[in-house]
Amino acid sequence: MKNIYSNIYKANLTNLKKAKKNIENDYIIGMPTETVYGLAGNAYSDKSVKKIFKFKKRPNFNPLIIHYKNLMDLKNDVILNKTFIKLYRAFCPGPITFILNRKIKSNISKIATAGKKTVAVRIPRHKIARNLLKILNVPLAAPSANIASKLSPTSAKDVVKEFGNKIKLILDGGYCQIGLESTIIDLTKKPSILRPGSITAEKIQKILNKTIGTKKSSEIVKAPGQLKLHYSPGIPVKMNRKYPEKNQAFIVFGKKFTKERNQFNLSKGGSLKEAARNLYKTMRKIKNKKFRSIAVTKIPNIGIGRAINDRLKKASKK
Ligand code: AMP
Ligand code: MG
């Protein structure tokens, strides 16, 4: 059955099969994952991958994450190592993306990986994404379903707002459970986090029994500057503010904030997990209410708070 939006589809078997057909014919679709919604296409098809870049207006040097149903499929395309196996056992399927070396015989579109010798791979845990991957014979290239540098979508409706009916089929998975993009870890050399996420450095270090570094993904894709502004609501964002300016939306966190005008609480109970889930949703709400700018209170820089601050920092770049 269709939703009131003609391109949002309930993820039943009939519609999953429809999605499969779309992918097999090099069309791209909207797909929920536990992190954010993805714009998914056949990772082995240049034609399909080109569409993803075009729809997103994504610069062609910025490679895509490739999504797999299982380890067996994944190892056709990348070279595994011991660190990967440990992290795979601990966190997969889940919200974590690994950078690994590409196998020479890999079929992944070179456009998807921006011609690099490495590939970003992930096995998502969202039931709908998994159900779709299970009936497909190919992995899915799936970046976040938003125009490049804008906010990632956390509901099917957000995807429609971003692309109108240009995307013919979006599988509905409700709101995303995590609401922030996956952790990205580079395992091609000494493990290093390129993008913080809900699987935190602390959790990873516990599994690996050693400290790991952090590096900006923009350093890796060799496009410093160009990718600085990201996750942007399209209006200025100011971090670490005690008070908002007049007519500014004020994003707050925790119970010490009593509800005041123009105030949006990410988590009244002070849960960083809840705050992460609400971040993009709240920014979209603020944008829809036509505020001209956003002030954000200080968010604790621990656990997933680091991922929240990373996104806010990038959203606040000019
Ligand atoms: P998104 O498009 O929102 O899913 O984000 C994907 C992120 O993964 C981008 O920041 C890419 O730069 C990064 N990425 C993808 N492939 C690679 C790679 N081979 N090496 C480093 N970063 C990558
Ligand atoms: Mg993105």
Image (cartoon, rainbow, N blue to C red):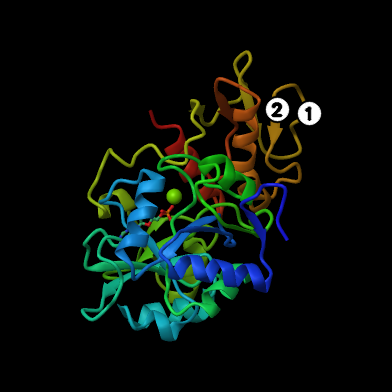
Horizontal side of 44 relative to 115 (left or right) equals: right
Q: Residue at x 50, y 46 (%)?
A: 166
Q: Is residue 308 above or below residue 198?
A: above
Q: Is residue 192 left or right of residue 10?
A: left
Mark 2 sits near ligand 2, with its Cβ under 8 Å away: no
Residue 282 x/y as whole percent: 64, 38
Q: What residue type is disc 1 on?
A: Lys
Q: Are marks 1 and 2 in contact (CB under 8 Å)?
A: yes
Looking at the image, residue 170 sits to the left or right of residue 219; the answer is: right
Position of 244 relative to 283 (above/below): above
| Residue position marked by numbered label 2 in the rendering | 263
Residue at the location (34% across, 71% down)? 44
Q: Is residue 218 above or below residue 232?
A: below
Mark sitting on residue 259? 1
Q: Residues within 10 Å of mark 1 (few under 14, many from 20)?
A: few
The foreground one among 257 and 81 is 81
Q: Secondary structure at mark 2?
A: strand
Question: Residue 151: which numbered mark, if any?
Answer: none
Residue at far top of view: 246
Residue 18 sits in quarter: bottom right
Towards the viewer: 146 or 187 = 146
Q: Nearer the viewer, residue 291 or 244?
A: 291
Query: Few, some or many C-alpha atoms within 10 Å of disc 2 (few <14, some 14-19, many ≥20)?
Result: some
Residue 76 lies, in percent from the top left, at 34, 83
Badge count: 2
Q: Is residue 175 left or right of residue 237?
A: right
Quadrant housing the N terminus: bottom right
Residue 139, given in percent of the width and then of the height, sits at 42, 73
Q: Residue furthest bottom?
A: 72
Quick check: is the Cβ at mark 1 less than 8 Å away from ligand 2?
no
Image point 24% across, 45% down: which residue?
Answer: 223
